[in-house]
């Protein structure tokens, strides 16, 4: 089984849109990220790889998750395409190229892209993805290159 977690960045400041890339997290966002990541850790969920948009609010969310889940922050890989806006096909290509020794991977990024990926990876999903939403998706495959759209099950 392969598992993907899609995490929308935590609540960010409601200003600074002229420099969107550098918008920071609000205190509420930091607290939400701590709460959710600690709960995942309590449930025994461990990330084997983390990928993040390099935008400040996303990478800071990823670092909070890493810290609380015992994942080395220096091992978070920043992917520019997660900020720029990958199509579902491009995102699926990232997943399909993951090393098969990985079982659980985390992606941190932005809406509307992350809600679109969730809608397309799951067999059925009609929910929303507010800030810091964390969606786990299980795939009944042994290889990442066997994952395709509409084959995931909501964790």
Image (spheres, rainbow, N blue to C red):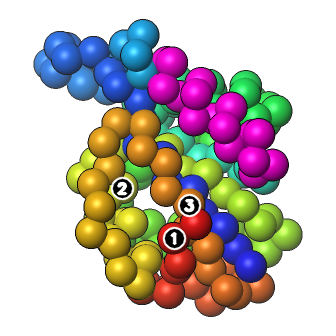
Question: Where, by quadrant of the figure, is residue 83 drawn?
Answer: top left
**Looking at this view, is 42 or 74 the one in front?**
42
- Side of 97 where 83 appears, left or right: left
- Mark 1, other Cα within 10 Å: few <14 / some 14–19 / many ≥20: some
Query: Is residue 34 part of the magenta span, yes or no?
Result: yes
- Going from the N terminus, do you reach mark 3 or mark 2 first? 2
Q: Is mark 2 on a helix, strand or loop?
A: helix
Q: Distance between the residues labelled 1 and 2?
A: 14 Å
- Side of 154 where 81 appears, left or right: left
- Going from the N terminus, do you reach mark 1 or mark 2 first? 2
Question: Where, by quadrant of the figure, is residue 144 drawn?
Answer: bottom right
> Of the residues tagged 1 and 2, which is closer to the observer?
1
The residue sitting at 30% across, 42% down in the picture is: 130
Q: Point out residue 91 in the picture as x, y percentages from the top left corner.
A: 44, 66
> Of the residues tagged 3 and 2, which is closer to the observer?
3
Query: Is residue 54 part of the magenta span, yes or no?
Result: no
Q: Looking at the image, is 62 positioned above or below residue 29?
A: below
Read off the residue under disc 2.
114
Q: How many marks?
A: 3
Q: Distance between the residues labelled 3 and 1?
A: 6 Å
Question: Where, by quadrant of the figure, is residue 89 drawn?
Answer: bottom left
Q: Point out residue 118 in the picture as x, y percentages from the top left corner.
A: 39, 66
The stretch in magenta equals: 30-46
Read off the residue under disc 1.
154
Rendered image: mark on residue 139:
none
Q: Quadrant of the C terminus?
A: bottom right
Magenta: main secondary structure equals: helix
Read off the residue under disc 3.
136
């Amino acid at each position: 089984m392969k598992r993907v977690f899609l995490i929308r960045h935590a609540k960010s400041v409601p200003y600074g849109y002229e420099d969107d890339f550098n918008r920071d997290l609000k205190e509420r966002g930091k607290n939400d990220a701590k709460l959710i990541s600690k709960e995942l850790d309590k449930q025994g969920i461990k990330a084997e790889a983390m990928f993040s948009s390099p935008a400040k609010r996303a990478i800071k969310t990823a670092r909070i998750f890493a810290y609380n889940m015992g994942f080395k922050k220096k091992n978070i890989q920043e992917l520019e395409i997660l900020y720029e806006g990958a199509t579902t096909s491009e995102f699926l290509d990232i997943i399909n190229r993951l090393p098969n020794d990985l079982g659980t991977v985390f992606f941190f990024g932005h809406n509307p892209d992350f809600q679109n990926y969730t809608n397309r990876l799951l067999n059925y999903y009609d929910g929303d993805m507010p800030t810091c939403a964390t969606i786990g998706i299980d795939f009944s495959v042994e290889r990442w290159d066997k994952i395709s759209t509409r084959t995931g099950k909501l964790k």
